[in-house]
Image (tube, rainbow, N blue to C red):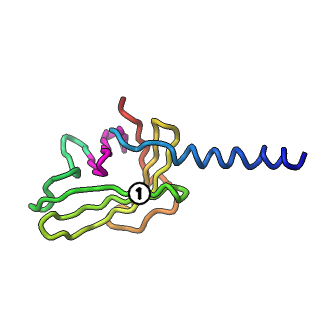
Amino acid sequence: MKKLLLLVFILPLMSFNLLNTDFNIVGTWKGYDNGDIGYAIFDKEGYATFESNGESMGGKEFMMNDEKAQMTFILNKETQPMEIDFVITLLESGETQSLLGIIQFENKDKLRLGVGFDGGDRPLDFDEENSIYFERVK
């Protein structure tokens, strides 16, 4: 009986953790922020692109302050919430700058992204100021 009770309580916790790490971030995600619509695009090669109001930043190559740059992402599924780093690399100098964030999948087609804007620290949790919900574009 004790083993059965233990399974009843522990199994759901384990399956939640597995579900949260099995989601695939690759794809195009549509987000809403203060009435504006933007997109986050994560590709299978590890590049990230943000698009808003017809402007694009990121990907394999883009211009930033008159220099060629690229933006990649690193997803750490071992933490709760998951950590995501957006790494901007200036292609000529190799100089890097990171935007640190957290991410949580609500389901396979909806996620919440929180970031430390302006080079700030990684958020510890989600709030209205640091986070945006995104839905997968099908």
Residue at the right extreme, as displayed: 1
Q: Which residue is mark 1?
A: 84
Q: Nearer the viewer, residue 133 or 96?
A: 96
Q: At 85% across and 48% down in the image, what residue appears?
A: 3
Q: At 43% across and 64% down in the image, what residue appears?
A: 122
Q: At 41% across and 55% down in the image, what residue appears?
A: 75
Q: Is residue 55 left or right of residue 7?
A: left
Q: Is residue 19 left or right of residue 29?
A: right
Q: Nearer the viewer, residue 92 or 130?
A: 92
Q: Main secondary structure of the magenta part?
A: strand
Is residue 82 shown above or below 132? below
Residues in magenta, as a range: 29-50
Is residue 88 shown above or below 55? below
Is residue 42 shown above or below 119? above
As for residue 44 lying within the magenta part, the answer is yes
How far from the left and from the top, in percent, is residue 128?
47, 52
How far from the left and from the top, in percent, is residue 131?
43, 51
Write down the quadrant of residue 40 in the picture: top left
* Location of the N terminus (image quadrant): top right
Number of residue marks = 1
Q: Amino acid at mark 1?
A: Ile
